[in-house]
Image (cartoon, rainbow, N blue to C red):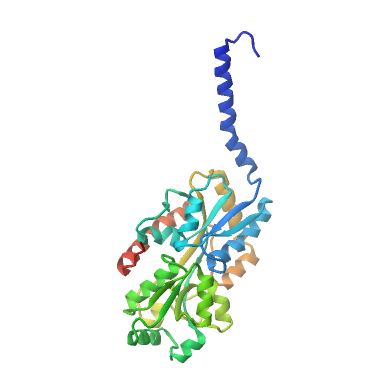
Amino acid sequence: MNPFVRPGRRAALALASSLLCLAALPAAAQGNWPTKAVRIVVPFAAGGTTDILARAIAPELSKAFGQPFIVDNRAGAGGNVGAEIVAHSPPDGYTLLMGTVGTHGINRALYAKLPYDPIKDFAPITLVAGVPNVMVMQTEKARALGINNVADFIRYAKAHPGKLNMASSGNGTSIHLAGELFKSMSGTYMVHFPYRGSGPALMDMVSGTMDVMFDNLPSSMPQIKAGKLKALAVTSAQRSAALPDVPTIEQAAGLKGFDASSWFGLLAPAGTPPEIVNRIQQEVAKSLGTPAIKEKLLAQGAIPSGNTPAQFAQLIESEHRKWAKVVKDSGAKVD
């Protein structure tokens, strides 16, 4: 202690020194990050495309950073439950979200009250993949009803309004809205049954409990390949390389301009240090560029991305505008 400094002055200097040390802590933490397991919240049940993509990149991030990246499924309310958890988590890089077009492009327009702000409460990291949806029926049921294509489906649905059940991964998901858009543009009516993710919905599709679903292609692909589900059409503007013989909705039924694709990307809570955000983006992009991961995702119908945080932020903004119009035109609403 310096005897020539007055006691009041010494206290002030001590306080200033403490504040400087505290200010330096986040920088030090950023430099050492991660020092423990990182959680990737998937806002849907296991088995769906959101879960599939999270589990594809989690092991690669674990290897890159030397800490476990653990997938945590928190399903409910069209992805809102999981998204809210991450929005209100500390912005320290240890809690991430595998967000979707539903949580960050659709839900603001669909839900009367959202427990998070898709723009203000998150720091976009990177788009992981874009995915077309696919219109599927149980193969045996389609055969029994005489439905071989989308035109057949529309004729049957119009002749039997309200008799067909439409499964989805939850209210407000792209799967739900793809079905609503189809109903609106085709003049058909099916009863909507929302599930807590694609996984449980697909179980009822395969069993024949549900009649039709507009699912993300990667989660339906195994059942399509196994012959248990019949792919009537893809919902994107172009055909999918993974199912080149399956037409688009527009090609199959003449519904001009029909396009209801999905996307999935990593986000962190707002305020997460840019250094952490950029490090994660770089490693995700690197892993998506490896032949093994890239070929695996393409075979399932997903198109890998790995774009920058700024590019992902621009996509989210544009998707807000697009899906707000779809929600308004379809009349879909969730309290």
In this view, which residue lies farthest toward the top? 4
Q: Position of residue 23 (x, y in %)?
A: 56, 32
**How many discs appear?**
0
* One can see residue 166 in this view: yes
Is 325 drawn above or below residue 183 in the view shown? above
Is 108 drawn above or below residue 14 in the view shown? below
Which image quarter holds the N terminus? top right
Which image quarter holds the C terminus? bottom left
Q: Position of residue 310 (x, y in %)?
A: 47, 51
Which residue: 31% across, 79% down? 187
Please state which of residues 242 and 215 is positioned toward the viewer in this rendering: 215
* One can see residue 311 in this view: no
Q: Position of residue 30 (x, y in %)?
A: 60, 41
Q: Is residue 84 left or right of residue 65?
A: left
Q: Is residue 311 left or right of residue 253?
A: right
Q: Position of residue 254 (x, y in %)?
A: 35, 81
